């Protein structure tokens, strides 16, 4: 079996050029979506190393949990129900994580709370003319302005009716051609399709011994999109509602987007499938004066977000953070039951070792508020990174998300799920010693279709992962991520998890975390200044 490694050649120089193009493209789209990032000063790279001492105790740990045990934790999390922030299911998920932390011997295992804002639709519908159209409400639409706006929203029992106008992909040029004031505007929701060739070229290393990653393949991820830019244009132009056609999606309208805080969407919106979009456009051709009626009622309310935290002390207060998020808007087997279960696997493995076996403290954390504004992440940043207490300093962050099966859109429009893993990458800003640990772990555990990518590939837009806040604060990160298109859909169910990869993935990151003990603090990061920006 052969690993694919990038080398300094003319091809490598071309790789950097292509990667730059990819970064620019991604940065444009990232600038229109996702959570905003906080920033603070970069930790002092000249701090005293926390390398393993000659007297380091090597204690035999319990084996890394197996596939079946890790999968059982994912099943437990999905059994709680839809783990939306502020719901009983969300609270039970956080409590479950803390109970497991305590069971595995973590110290000071507890929940920290923060105020967040949950958006809930109670009643919705869409008609074009007198014809009902199957639709699903756009999450976080029809809300008051500002981050903390709360209250009910309603179009009234009869809905909001206005002429329907089509602006295609919703670009600035298309808006300039259309008069949308006082109208319902329809647009094509487009996701940034990343060609796999760019993914491969931009990587320092990828493991694909059977050559299953075809350069012509496309990564159809569901979160980098044109939505925020469209929504801002529609609101500014005076539209009274909108219809988003999921033009790149499979035949589902159950798409529950994050709270893209760069877009304050004060008008009601509905998602419809690509097929329904074709039907609506045919209706507009037959009757260019057709109206649309949007019905949407619900509320946005202040809720409690919960972060589960536990520690395994080491011989120093320098800390390695291991994280994921336990919340989800649907079953969330992949997003992010799989990541949370990987955190539990590592907690159980390292919890069987004495503190004397570790040069550094380990901190295990799962967040919620992933879909409601990332307030938990920001509070964590302030407490543990910007203004750490008791001399503790986070010197590295391992973030684990999405042990996912590959999915594409079949010719029929159905979701086609493969037994192979979705192409995945570890976004990182680490030094050569850490990258060598990671390469070795990927190959030894045969984690196929997996790449090591520079976090800077997305430029000033940061990284589209749960580690984005720590990354922007200057902490070296190793952030595992993949983007199967069903992540934000109710089809994210247990059958989408790559069950056979659960144990190898945990074992690989266990070896990386253990190897970090032998890397001096100043050599964990790559030393490259992080370009600041927002998403």
Image (cartoon, rainbow, N blue to C red):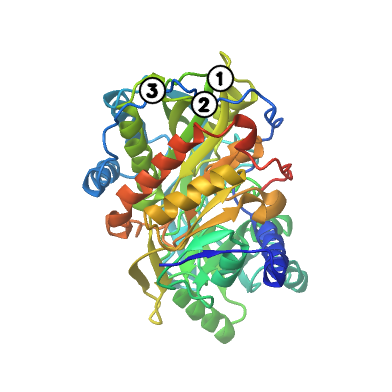
**Percent x, y for residue 463?**
60, 49
**First in sequence: mark 3 vs mark 2:** 3
Quarter of the image with the N terminus in it: bottom left
Q: Is residue 72 left or right of residue 354?
A: left
Q: Quadrant of residue 310?
A: top left
Q: Are marks 3 and 2 in contact (CB under 8 Å)?
A: no
Q: Is residue 432 in view?
A: yes
Q: Is residue 45 shown left or right of residue 82?
A: right
Q: Which residue is mark 3?
A: 57
Q: Nearer the viewer, residue 69 or 314?
A: 314
- Mark 3 or mark 1, whichever is nearer to me: 3
> Which disc is residue 392 wearing?
1
The spot of residue 288 in percent (x, y) is: 61, 81
**Spatial CA span between label 3 and label 2:** 18 Å
Residue found at x 45% / y 41%: 512
Label for residue 109? Answer: none
Q: Is residue 141 visible?
A: no
Judging from the image, what secondary structure is the residue with disc 2 in?
Answer: strand
Q: Circle 2 is placed at which residue position?
A: 319
């Amino acid at each position: 079996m052969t690993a694919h490694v990038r080398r300094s050649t003319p091809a490598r120089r071309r790789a950097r050029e292509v990667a730059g193009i990819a970064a620019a493209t991604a940065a444009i789209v990232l600038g229109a979506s996702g959570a905003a990032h906080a920033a603070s000063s970069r930790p002092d790279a000249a701090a005293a190393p926390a390398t393993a001492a000659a007297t380091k105790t090597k204690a035999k740990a319990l084996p890394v949990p197996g596939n079946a045990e890790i999968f059982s934790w994912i099943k437990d999390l999905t059994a709680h129900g839809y783990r939306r922030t502020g719901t009983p299911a969300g609270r039970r998920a956080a409590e479950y994580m803390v109970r497991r932390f305590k069971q595995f011997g973590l110290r000071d295992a507890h929940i920290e709370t923060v105020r967040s804002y949950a958006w809930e639709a109670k009643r919705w519908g869409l008609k074009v003319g007198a014809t009902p159209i199957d639709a699903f409400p756009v999450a976080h639409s029809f809300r008051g302005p500002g981050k903390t706006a709360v209250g009910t929203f309603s179009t009234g029992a009869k809905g909001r009716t206005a002429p329907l106008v089509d602006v295609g992909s919703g670009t600035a040029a298309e808006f300039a051609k259309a008069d949308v004031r006082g109208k319902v505007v329809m647009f094509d929701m487009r996701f940034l399709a990343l060609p796999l060739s760019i993914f491969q070229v931009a990587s320092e290393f990828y493991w694909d011994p059977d050559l299953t990653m075809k350069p012509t393949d496309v990564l159809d991820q569901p979160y980098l999109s044109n939505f925020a830019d469209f929504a801002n244009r529609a609101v500014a132009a005076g539209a009274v509602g909108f219809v988003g056609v999921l033009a790149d999606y499979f035949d589902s309208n159950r798409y529950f987007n994050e709270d893209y805080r760069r877009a304050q969407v004060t008008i009601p919106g509905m998602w419809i499938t690509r097929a329904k979009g074709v039907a609506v456009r045919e209706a507009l051709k037959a009757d260019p004066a057709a109206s649309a009626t949007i019905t949407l009622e619900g509320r946005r309310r202040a809720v409690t977000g919960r972060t589960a935290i536990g520690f395994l002390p080491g011989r120093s207060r320098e800390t390695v953070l291991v994280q994921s998020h336990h919340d989800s808007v649907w079953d969330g087997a992949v997003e992010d039951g799989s990541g949370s279960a990987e955190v539990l696997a590592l907690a159980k493995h390292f919890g069987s070792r004495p503190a004397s076996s570790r040069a550094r403290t380990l901190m295990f954390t799962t967040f919620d508020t992933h879909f409601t504004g990332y307030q938990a992440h920001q509070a964590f940043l302030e407490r543990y990174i910007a203004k750490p207490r008791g001399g503790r300093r986070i010197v590295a962050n391992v973030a684990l998300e999405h042990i996912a099966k590959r999915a594409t859109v079949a010719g029929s429009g159905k979701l086609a799920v493969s037994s192979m893993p979705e192409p995945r990458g570890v976004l990182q800003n680490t030094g050569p010693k850490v990258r060598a640990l990671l390469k070795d772990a990927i190959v030894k555990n045969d984690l196929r279709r997996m790449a090591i990518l520079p976090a800077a590939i997305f430029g000033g837009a940061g990284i589209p992962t749960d580690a984005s806040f720590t990354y922007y604060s200057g902490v070296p990160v190793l952030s595992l991520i993949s983007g199967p298109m069903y992540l934000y859909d109710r089809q994210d169910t247990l059958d989408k998890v790559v069950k056979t990869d659960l144990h190898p993935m945990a074992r690989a990151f266990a070896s990386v975390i253990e190897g970090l003990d032998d890397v001096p603090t100043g050599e964990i990061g790559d030393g490259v200044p992080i370009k600041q920006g927002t998403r």
